Amino acid sequence: MKRLLLAVTMAMSMLSFAQSDDDAPIPYGDEGDEASGDKVTPKKAKKRRRVEDVREEDEEEKEGEESLASVDDPNVGVGGDIFMGVALLDGAKNGVDPRYFFGLRFTWEFGRLIPDEFLREMFFMDVAWTYAASKEGTTQVNVDTHLHNFTLAPAFTLPFGSKSPAAIYAQVGLGFDYSYSVTKIDTQTVTLGGTKFLFQYGLGLRFRPALVGDGTIRLQIRLEVTRFIRGYMHDMYFGAGAGMIF
């Protein structure tokens, strides 16, 4: 009798265990865990959700920092400089005519309109006026020529490093040349003037060290080689400039 009761008890226990195992809720998880056969407990799933939430928050913070790069920039990106140097003017008779030149230049760093922190340092534009003069002839007969170049020239810059104040740049521009000449023959003088289309291109080095701690005021130093094409004349300018960028 005892053996019979023991057998019945064991059979009922096995039956109830099988039923409870079939009726148990299925643990949830992602498709990758189900495909691999790994069970994901509620505790693991909750932990995974927390990690994903933290990751999304970090990505949102990074995007916010990148979008605020233009807002936090201490520089407005405008300034100007005075420049001068030697102009190798294309002489009609004597070939190259070396002369002194000087000019004024307004600079706008329009790349600061770009939100990306690296690209915003790569573009600027110059509005410049350059003056040079030459004189050929003798005391009795001579021609005094004055050249005024007006150009608008965007530039592409490659900084030497993400935080470096030095960079190399290439520049291409358009404008016009206003020139006039005074021809003197003894006591007689004749003045002729006119304008010509002007094409400009060149290379240079640009340095922008900060003058104050927050970088709102920077010194601008430039060394450059520029070629001007005015009609059939080709002039080459070797110059250096110094000014401010705010």
Image (cartoon, rainbow, N blue to C red):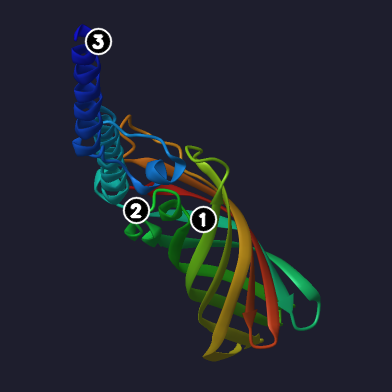
Q: Which mark is residue 83?
A: 1
Callout in the foreground (3, 2): 3
Q: What is the quadrant of residue 28 in the picture?
A: top left
Give the SS element for disc 1. Answer: strand
Regarding residue 129, the answer to whether it shows in the image is yes
Is 2 positioned to the left or the right of 171 in the image? left
Q: Nearer the viewer, residue 218 or 60?
A: 60
CA separation in Å, label 3 and label 2: 97 Å
Q: Is residue 243 left or right of residue 9?
A: right
- State which tag comes first along the sequence, 1 or 2: 2
Give the percent coordinates (x, y) of residue 200. 59, 74
Sequence-first disc among 3 and 2: 3
Circles 3 and 2, Cβ within 8 Å, touching? The answer is no
Kindly identify the residue that appears in the image at 55 percent across and 91 percent down.
192
Label whose residue precedes the other's in the sequence (3 or 1): 3
Q: Residue furthest top?
A: 2
Relative to 170, say whether 229 is above or below: below
Q: Residue at image x 56%, y 76%?
A: 147
Query: Residue 62: percent from the left, percent from the top?
Result: 31, 42
Q: Residue at x 43, y 39 (%)?
A: 37
Of tags 1 and 2, the one toward the viewer is 2
Instruction: Give the number of the disc on residue 77.
Output: 2
Query: Which residue lies under the disc numbered 3?
Result: 3
| Crowdedness near tag 3: few (<14), some (14–19) or many (≥20) residues, C-alpha within 10 Å | few
The percent coordinates of residue 190 (x first, y second) are 57, 92
Quarter of the image for residue 209 reads top left
- Badge 3 marks a residue whose secondary structure is helix
